[in-house]
Structures are given as structure tokens and as C-alpha cells.
Amino acid sequence: MMPPRTFWPRNNTPARWLPLIFGLLWLVAGRAWAAPPPPFVVNSEPDNARITIYSEYLPDPDNHYSLEDVVSGGLDHRFQPASRFVERLGLSNHDWWIRVSIHNELSDQQRFALVMAPRAYQDSQFYLPDGPPGTTRYRTPLPDESFVHRYPIQVLDLPLGQPQVFYWRVNPHGELVYSLTLTTMQKALGDNPLYGVYWLLIGMLLAMSLYHLALALMRSAASHGYHALFGFCVVGLIVIGSGFLGHLDDLSSWDHPLRLTLLSGALFAACGAGRTFVDSRQHSPALHYILLVLGALALVQIPLLLILPSPAAMGLCCILVLLTAPCLIALGYQAWHREVPAGALFFFTSILVGVPAAILCLVTLGLLHTGLDVPLTLLLVFTVAGTLQTAGLRLQHQRRQRLKAEQLRNQAVAETVETTRRETLARMGHDARTPLSGILGMAELLDDTPLTPNQKECVSAIHNAGESLLKIINDVLEYSQLSTSGAEISHEALDVHELLVDAVDLFRERAEEKQVELITHVHTNVPARMEGDPGRLRQVLTNLIGAFIRQAQHGELIIDVSLEPTGQAGQVRFEFSGTALRAGTLHDLRENGARQDSSTLNLAIAEQLVEAMSGRCGHRDGHNQEPAYWFIVPLSALDDPAPDNPADRVPLLGRSMLVVDDSTTVTRVIRHLALSWGMRVTASNDPREALASLRTQANINEPYDVVLLDHQMPGMTGVQLAARIHEDPVITHSPVLIMLTGISSSPTDVDARNVSIHRVLTKPVSAPRLKQVLSEELGLQRPSAPRQRSESPDPGLQVLVVEDHKLSQKVIRGMLNKLGITPELAANGLEALHRATQKRYDLILMDCEMPEMDGFEATRRIRAHERENGLVAVPIVALTAHILREHRERSLASGMNAHIPKPVELNVLRDVLIRFTRRGQVEESGEET
């Protein structure tokens, strides 16, 4: 039988395992009570001894640990030693247990103060030993053992030679930061010299913020407002975060909401300060919009932060700061790189503020550890950055003020130069128009006297040269006025046909001299009556026609008027094209400074007028393109009926017409018009071909009713063709012959009558005029009654002419004498005033620029005399060489009834006399005649 097995080996005695057993028991027993941390030994009077590194901390993520659990020793292995004088444990929303051991070796002192900085946590409790050293019983401090003086202070009674272990439970509900300092009661209640540095820097930040706020209110400067808001928010954050207000119990519950709100406000202000300091919209649009979004998020998140748990809310703020800091640094770099004023300064301050702010956020999130006094560091950094930013804003303001002063000075100089230029031009225009009006007036008077043909030709040459010179002077003055004050645009009824004819009539002779055939074509879809400014539109047409004829070559200049092809209502297109326009001419004219001649001036005036009428211009003059210039102006159709035109009531439907012209453009335009009237049209470019067509129609007994033939054609003239038609035995039914011709080449009445030409029309002929002539010659309408003789003024009128220029006196007196009136003369305004107060006149023609007293002052005094004596106002008409708008307004403001520019035409003078001297009618037009 085998012996029973025992636990112990045969060759070993139990005594050899006793040490192992006792060691295990000792380890197990060791866990039954708390193993204290290494104590801080007090061997001399502590002078603000920072004992944080002698402490240990234990996280309680589930808030399950009680004081008994912590003191029992079962959690000793989970305690972690602190490693910094200011321990930062990140964001949390649970309990932490902190313990520290202190060993007092001072025999004469047993009471000390434990300062727990940097803030008073609302959810915290300190525990003191309640018994001899090594006890596991703890109690909360009595009222006289715990108080707040800037920071929470615990009064500790330390027995001599025995270590004491203290426990502190705290739930930060956010960031946990703690620093333990052991000192005496006297020093704990005394003033720390470091506090003076804090308050000095805080005072500087507040002073700068108030300075920015005052400037923001005075100058309405957004940048100063953002800097003020940033400074106030930073001061609030540092004051609350540093624990300076920890003794205010009412503030403790608002600690986290205030910190989050102030941090969001500082973030919003930083984004705004960066955008406005650098003007990021101009220098970095992408960063500008990114900072706008970040600033908006900083404001929008404030209500959300008050709802979220404190750690999540603080984490969200830190993330926004980490996004904003590099954006501000990048904006500063771009500002420095692009040499923005004070850009280098902003780059430096963005680094100075952005880097510490980012480090603080990383420390807050627990991603980075540092032993620095963060509030003091941030306060110092922000104070330096604020000082630099304040200096930068001051430099920017001085630069803006300097630029503004320079701009105002330049503007004043430009206005002075412009005023001087305009006054000089006006004076030169006045001084040039005054003798020119005398020349033209004398030429007009001389032309009405018996002259030989040679003398008449000389007078006509003088008159034409004077008109050309007058046109140049008017163009210069008009361009000066348009360049400065723009154009006055009126809205009244107009007829495009009449405007076009009026403009073309001025250039018929000049066009014939350069062998340029003017062709007008108004499309049938253009309304008969429209609303616009006929004066300005006529001015545009005359300037453009004059410029193009001056630069034209031999050929055709086509003026085509149609509605805008895009179909936009009320838009009328005027286009100039044809073989008369050389390739490259339009490009040269439109190039700035390409050709400084009258054509460039005419084109500039026309384009400014088109722009004033809300129109637009353009041209095509490229390679392999037919040169053309166009402009489009808004002209709305009128619904009111046009004045009665008998030709519109006459139907030409079914009538046949043969158009003979070597120009395919002319035949195309006339054919288009005749077809729109319902006529049957045949076009021919060869006179011999036209004659054959006439014979053919006669043979088939369908003769033409009208033959419209050109005068100058190759191979056979229009007169020769008419003679052949008249003599041809086959053509038994003689058609109505109408000839189109130029001014200089027009046949005489005898020559036209001898070849049975019924009517001679000068080219170009308008559609209404051609339709009227066709109706009259076909017997469908009676010929227009001859215009009645113009009404003449009363020869007994008492007229006073106030004029200081002798030649102008002679011209006006001669014109009035032709009208049967003998005027009285006054050489200046003072003499005119004397005569007007002594005698009543029917009309006063008043010059404006005169010595001793000008016409404006004389008119004002005459009006004052009439008011004082209750007299009826005598019509006073300004008679001056000034044509600019301000002079017309000045004359009307002084009390004159109308404004007549020199040189005065006889018909205009007659109309003025009749208009203002009708019996029983008081006329106060206030218009230019």
C-alpha cells in the first residue's frame, strides 16, 4: 500500500516556503490600506512652494468611486503621478481624485495654507484626515478650514514628524487644470507680486480696446470695432480663466457659458479684424470667404454651446480656433508677400497670436502638455500683438488720410484745370463766334443785293467757309460739354425719315465733291413715329456722316435704318456701310489717339451722345469683312396717330414701275420700298436693257406706269435715255419719267421738259417723299399747295438792340431793316438799363458779354424795375455767341425769355420777333431758339 501523497515534496520542509508565503500575505495585506504617495517634506518655512509634482491623480470615468474606495488602497495602482507644476488633464465631465502627502518637520509651526489654483471648481470636495496618521477615516473641512481668496485655500494642521495624506475630488465639467501651492497663512492672504503684472497687462489691453472702440464710433471703422471686441473678449477670458474672480460665488455657475461665449466672440472678432486690416476681399478672395464662414460659425455656435455638454462645447471652440489660426497666418503671409500696406506687421502679429492660441487649444484638448503659465503667457502675447496692431492701424489711417488729401488735392487741381479749360474754350468760342457771326451775317446781307455771277460765287464761298469754321467751333465746344457734364436728353415725337433727310441734306455737296453717293434705306418695319430726342439723334447722324465722308473714298455710303435684329422692342439700329468706307478706317478712327483730326472728334461726340441716350455703338473692320459702323438707340413707337399725310391715303397697288440705275444698291432699296406699297417693280442696271424692257412691255400691251431713272449712268445718261423713250415709235404709251440726280449735275428745267421728264428729285430721296411724288405724277393726288409766305413782324415795333461789337450791331441792324424795323442801339448793359427805364420797348435783344455791365445784370435790374413799378415784363431775348448749356441756363435764370446763339439767321430773327411781339399774348418760353 502506497503512502498517501502529500502536498509537500518529500525532500523539502515547510520552513523553506515560509518566506514566500509571508511575502504573498504581505502583498495582499498591503492592498488593504492606502499606500501614500511620496510626501513633500516641510523642513523650512514654505514660501509659495509648488507641490503639484508631489500629487497623484486618478480618473473616475463612470463616477463610481467613493471616498472609501479610494482610501482603502484598492485603487492605488491606478493613481498616476503629476509631472508639472501646473497639471493639465484635458477636457472631461467626470470625477477625478487627487491626493498629496505632506510631511512636516518644523517644530514651531503646524498650521499651513494649501492654495488650489487656478480656479474654484463648483463640483469639488477636499478631504482631511480624521484621526492619527495612517487612518482611513476622512472628513470634509470645517467652515474655518476652507475659504476662497482669489483661489480656493485649505487650512492644514500638520503634526510634527508625521506625514499626512489629503484627498481632493473634483469634476471640472470641462478642462481640468490644477496647481497646488503650500505656504503660510500670512503669505496666502497677502498680495502676490505676479498679480501686479497681470493687472498691468489687463489694463493695457482694456485701454487699447477702449481706444479702438472710440475710434470705431467716431470713424465708423469696422476694423477698429473688431479689434475692440477682440480685446474685451480676451480680457474677459483671462480674468475668468486665471481665477481672479473665483471668490464670487454667483459667478461660478456662469463660468463655462461665459468662457464659451467670450471665446466665440474673440474668434469672430479675430476673423473680422484680419479681413478688414488686410482688405482680404481684394488681396485674397478665397481666404476672405473662408474667414467670413468661420466668423459666421463662431456666432452661430453660441446658442449650441450653451446646450452641449461643457467638454463637447469647449472642444468645438478649440477646433474652430485651430482652423482659424492657420487661415489668419496664411492671410498675413499673402499680405506681406503682395506688399500690402502694413502687411508684414500683420503677418508677424498673426503668428504671434495664432501660434499660442493653437497651442492652448491643443493643451486644452489634452493633445499637448506644457508647464507654462498659460494665462500670463497669452496676456503678454496679446498685449504685444495688440500694441503692434494698434500701431499698424494708426499707420494705415495716416496713409489713407494722406492718400485722401492727395486725392482731394488732385481732384481740386483737376477741377480747376477743367474749369479753366472750359472757360478758356467758352471764351475762345465766344471770341471766335462773334466776328464769325458778323462775317456770315454780312455775307447773307450781301447775297440779297444785286451781284454779278462771279461776286455771288465769292459770297457763297465766304458763306460756306464760315459755316465750316462755325461747325468746327461748335464741335469743340460740344465735345467739351459732353466730356464734363454729359448731354441733356429729351423725349418727344420724331420721324426717322425727316431726321435722316435733314442730316443728309447738309452733306450733299461735300459728298458729290468726293464722288460719294449717299444712299438711305429706312426699312418698312420701322414705325413712322417714335419717341426720342430728335435734336440729339440728328446731331449723332450729322457727326457720323461728316466723319465718314471726310475719310471716304469714291463709292457708296449706305445709311441703313432697321429694328434691332434680336427682336428687342424699341431698339432701332443705324448702320453705315458701303464701298466708300476704306478698310481699316473705322479701326483707326476708334483707336485712342490714332488720328487727332476733326473726324475723330466727330466720332467721339457721336458716341458720347449715343451713350447718353442709353444706346451702344460698334463696328466691324476686320480681315475680309466689309467695313461697317453701327449704333443702336432705344426709340419706342408712339400710339398716337401721325399728322395727316395725303400720300398715305393714296393706293399705289398694282402700278408698275421700272427702276433704272447703275447702282444695284439704289435699285434694291427702291424696289424694296415700292414692293411694300403694292407696286410691281422691275429693276435694271443698264439703260439699253431698260429700253428693251420698255419696248417688250409695250408690245405685250402692259406698259410701265412709271420709269425712275438715274441721271449719271455709264454708256447713256438719264437725259439721253429719256429722249430715246420719248422718240421710240414702239413705246406708244409714254410713262411718267422721274429722274434721280445730284445737286451739281442736275439738268436744267428746259432740258428736263424737252425730254418729257416730269420730276427731278435730288438723291437720296426719302420714302415718304418718293411716295408723294409718285402719287402726284400718277394723278392719284393733287400737288402740294405752295407754302404760304411767312408772316412778317409789325414794322412799327420798338426794338432795342444791346450789343457792344460794332460789326454785330451792323449785322443785326441790317437784318431788322430788311424786316422793316428800325431798332435803337445800346453799347452796353448800363446804357440798356437807362433806356429801358426811360422808355417801353416791344422787344430787347440783349448781348450777354459787355463792358461796364453785362447782359445778365442788366436784365436782373430791368426785371426789378418792372416789379417795383408794376409794369408788364418786356420780352428780353439773349443774343450771344455762347452756346454751352450753362450760359443758356444763366441767361434764363437772370430773367431772359429765350436764348439765340450767334450767328443769327434771318428766319430765326423773324420768328423771334413774331413770337414775342404778338398782341395780347405774353410769351415766356424759357427755351433756346
Image (tube, rainbow, N blue to C red):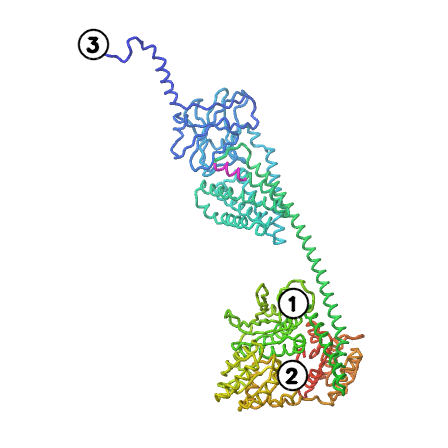
Cβ–Cβ under 8 Å for marks 1 and 2: no
The label shown at residue 25 is: none
Q: Is residue 845 visible?
A: yes
Residue holding disc 1: 604
Q: Residues within 10 Å of mark 2 (few under 14, many from 20)?
A: some
Q: Residue furthest left?
A: 1
Q: Residues within 10 Å of mark 3 (few under 14, many from 20)?
A: few
Q: Secondary structure at mark 2?
A: loop
Residue holding disc 3: 2
Residue type highlighted by circle 3: Met
* Distance from Cα at disc 2 to Cα at disc 3: 163 Å
Q: Residues within 10 Å of mark 1 (few under 14, many from 20)?
A: many
Give the image location of residue 514, x and y in percent: 67, 74
* Distance from Cα at disc 1 to Cα at disc 2: 35 Å
The reply to whether the magenta stretch includes residue 559 is no
Considering only vertical position in the picture, is 140 above or below 591? above
Q: Secondary structure at mark 1?
A: helix
Residue type highlighted by circle 2: Ser
Comparing marks 3 and 1, which lies closer to the viewer?
A: 1
Q: Which residues are magenta?
A: 357-365
Comparing marks 1 and 2, which lies closer to the viewer?
A: 2
